[in-house]
Amino acid sequence: MGKLSDLFRNPFSFLFTRSSQEDRLATYVIREHGRGRGLDDILDDPYVVNRAQPQQIARVLERPEVIRALGESAVAEQQQKLN
């Protein structure tokens, strides 16, 4: 019942929630980059390709924890490729 009361308190809260799928993708990208793989290779993995649309990948690349782990220049370069 707690979820229903939260909905009444802020009826637009669903607009600001992150999907657990995007959480898992962000974790995967950070982990694989930590293993020494390049961002292009990671984003071409079947794990990523089968689970995310380009818009979802763009949102994952906007996350602060991903930018911190990969570096701003690598993320900015990949975002340019997506657009």
Image (cartoon, rainbow, N blue to C red):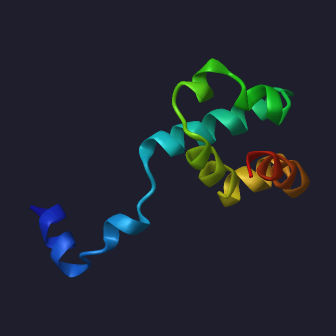
Judged left or right of residue 49, residue 20 is left
Q: Residue at x 54, y 24 (%)?
A: 50
Above or below, comparing residue 39 to residue 18 in the picture: above
Above or below, comparing residue 16 to residue 22 in the picture: below
Q: Residue at x 70, y 33 (%)?
A: 31
Task: Return the residue found at the far top.
Answer: 46
Q: Position of residue 37 (x, y in %)?
A: 84, 27
Q: Nearer the viewer, residue 72 or 78?
A: 78
Q: Nearer the viewer, residue 38 or 58?
A: 58
Above or below, comparing residue 47 to residue 58 in the picture: above
Judged left or right of residue 37, residue 5 is left
Q: Position of residue 54 (x, y in %)?
A: 61, 43
Task: Return the residue found at the far left.
Answer: 1
Q: Residue at x 52, y 45 (%)?
A: 23
Q: Position of residue 73 (x, y in %)?
A: 90, 54
Task: Return the residue found at the far front.
Answer: 83
Q: Nearer the viewer, residue 77 or 24?
A: 77
Q: Residue at x 65, y 57 (%)?
A: 63
Residue 48 occupies which quadrant of the picture? Answer: top right
Q: Which of the image's four quarters has the N terminus?
A: bottom left
Judged left or right of residue 12, residue 83 is right
Task: Return the residue found at the far right.
Answer: 73
Q: Position of residue 58 (x, y in %)?
A: 65, 51
